[in-house]
Amino acid sequence: MAATALPTLPEQFKSLQHHLRTGQELDKREPVVAYYCRLYAMQTGMKLDSKTPECRKFLSKLMDQLETMKKQLGDNEAITQEIVGCAHVENYALKMFLYADNEDRAGRFHKNMIKSFYTASLLIDVLSVFGELTEENVQHRKYARWKAAYIHNCLKNGETPQPGPIGMEEEDYDAETEDASSSALPTQVSQPSSSTYDPNMPTSNYTGIHIPPGAHAPANTPAEVPHSTGVTSNTVQPIPQNIPAVDPSLYNAKSAGEVRLTPEDFARAQKYCKYAGSALQYEDVSTAVQNLQKALKLLTTGRE
């Protein structure tokens, strides 16, 4: 989609090369995400160096790309409404994360799942164009980058990685070495069906073990509670919880005819529902109820 070719990346902007490459890879499949990848590079580049001639030339060409993309995307709400754009990028990053996490927990270790972990972390970087990252996103980014480094190093050394969350140690994922050895891996995987990333796959389609709260995985790292197998020796006893009182008015809540919800309202309601689903993965009923009440109130009254 972006027609203007960029000059050679200045050394000062080396840290942005993978964000820009991700933008190129997503140009046709996810142009909105590609746009924000470049916007992140633009904003970050301005902070790194906007004075030296080579950097100014690069930023000028990158700005031309952004203007071209903005015109081509027209009145797309994900471009004109920041909160919609933020939700769009965040949802795509989560899909990448979920795919890689699913492969990891199933013990299917390969270069494309490593790249998906790493790409998810890059897209979380991109979310900073909308404001400060949430603690949840910071944890996802840290976990995704660590997983990419850990699995990459294991495979490089002929070792079998341990699936799922384990004690995190500081490791570096050498993306440049990986790029050289795999020759620009595609973001969309071309593996057999059991190892294929589908950007439209339902986010609930994952399997794995149940991770208790306090594990090193991010708070809402996907983990499906195993179905009952009839074995009771390791049954975990329910933990008593203090459940917040539900607002009685919400039981019979009906949307008032005059309530008009904006795209921002829908995006916020989606986030509340997502947080509720995350809490239920860890049997945190209190947090789930609170977020569902917020979503229901917003949808029926237009107010939080």
Image (cartoon, rainbow, N blue to C red):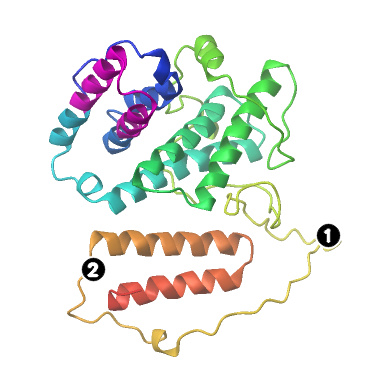
Q: Nearer the viewer, mark 2 or mark 1?
A: 2
Question: Is 49 in the magenta?
Answer: yes
Per the image, label 2 sits on a secondary structure element best described as: loop
Q: Is residue 3 magenta?
A: no
- N-term-proximal mark, 2 vs 1: 1
Q: Is residue 106 left or right of residue 8?
A: right
Nearer to the camera, 116 or 70: 70
Local secondary structure at mark 1: loop
- In space, the residues marked 2 and 1 are separated at their CA atoms by 47 Å
- Please tell me how crowded label 1 is: few (under 14), some (14-19), or many (20+) other residues with Cα within 10 Å: few
Residue 234 coordinates in the image, percent (x, y)? 83, 60
Q: Which sits in the foreground, 78 or 106?
A: 78
Q: Which residue is mark 1?
A: 234
Left or right position of 91 against 137: left
* Residue projecting furthest to the right: 233
Outermost bottom residue = 248
Percent of width and height locating residue 78 = 25, 47
Q: Which residue is mark 2?
A: 261
User: For the N terminus, which image quadrant?
Assistant: top left
* Amino acid type assigned to the residue bearing label 1 in the image: Asn
Of 231 and 22, the residue lying toward us: 22
Q: Using the rendered view, name the quadrant where residue 252 is placed.
A: bottom left
Amino acid tagged 2: Leu
Question: Could one spot residue 200 in this view of the protein?
Answer: no
| Residue drawn at x 60%, y 60% as measured from the top left | 281
**Residue 152 higher or lower than 245, as above or below:** above
Instruction: Tell me which segment is drawn in magenta.
Output: 37-65
